[in-house]
Amino acid sequence: MKNKITGYDEFIRESTNSSKDSAITRAIEILFALSSSPEPLSAIGVSEKLKIPKASIHRLMVHLESIGILEREPGSKKFITGQRLNNLAIETLINSPNKSMRHSILEALVSDLKETCNITALAGNKVIYIDRVESQWPLRIHLQPGSIVPIYCGASGKLFLSYMPAQQRRRILNSITLVKYTEHTIINIEKIEKELKKIRSQNYGLDIEEFMQGLIGIAVPIFNRNNKICGTVSIHIPTVRHDLSEAIACIPKLRIAAEKISQTFSREDI
């Protein structure tokens, strides 16, 4: 316990240094490096990327790990973003200054399509709802912002997976338990990969009663200013009201909304 406190005190002392080499500056650079990397990084990898001595980088990364900001990749010594950092990113999105603008875009979309629509983001290997507007139908699914859904059997999650490098995607699929939520849920990784290839080519995610019986999900990507997927706009359509062809007909309007929402994300450098 004494060593841990001593290390923290040293971290704080260095953090008060106003120079570009302060601990806080380096810690932030580490977080940017890891969050922008599609693969886990070792201390050596981060050191080479940032041109900062390995000893300093390793000490900072171990400290960030001790407070839950970073984690080790399972079965590896390499680092990935931790749950606390992922939670911070999601809470920042949910409560950002532009949330009212995004919510208005979503409200207009729901008013037009008459079905529940969502904005989602990816946190680690989970899909998080950062905003949601419910339809006025008595039959609907109640999920609040902050709700978590599986990545492998929902429209948004499969869309996120389809944009990942193959190695990162396979690592995620191998690290999670594939639960069969309905008779339509695909839990064979090779079959999931085959479907993800189709999703990437058509540039929209599709969930036909895979996560919830009687519900069709469709998701389109939201891109940031670097043309990377940073979220999705999705819709949930009960099969008692619409068939698949009617659900797919919603895609052009979803894409228009996604483009408008992407502009609010770009201003926040997401």
Image (cartoon, rainbow, N blue to C red):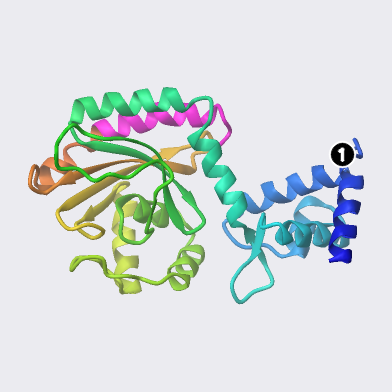
| Horizontal relation, residue 146 to residue 257: left or right | right
Q: Residue at x 52, y 33 (%)?
A: 225
Circle 1 — which element? loop
Q: In the image as oriented, which residue stretches furthest toward the bottom?
A: 75
State which quadrant residue 105 falls in: top left
- From the viewer's perspective, tell me whether residue 195 is left or right of residue 176: left
Percent across and percent down for residue 207 are: 24, 54
The percent coordinates of residue 243 (x first, y second) are 9, 47
Q: Nearer the viewer, residue 193 or 11?
A: 11
Nearer to us in this view, 45 or 143: 143
Q: Which residue matches tag 1?
A: 20
Residue occupying the point 55% across, 26% down? 267
Image vertical order of residue 21 relative to residue 72, above or below: above
Residue 129, image quadrant:
top left
**The image quarter in which residue 118 lies:** top left
Residue 260: x percent and y percent?
Answer: 39, 26
Residue 170 lies, with reference to residue 165, above or below; the image says below
Horizontal placement of 44 versus 81: left or right? right
Image: magenta residue range: 253-270
Looking at the image, is 97 positioned above or below residue 250? above
**Quarter the N terminus occupies:** bottom right
The secondary structure that most of the magenta stretch takes on is helix
Look at the image and say whether residue 120 sits in the magenta stretch: no
Q: Which amino acid does label 1 sit on?
A: Lys
Residue 263 in magenta stretch:
yes
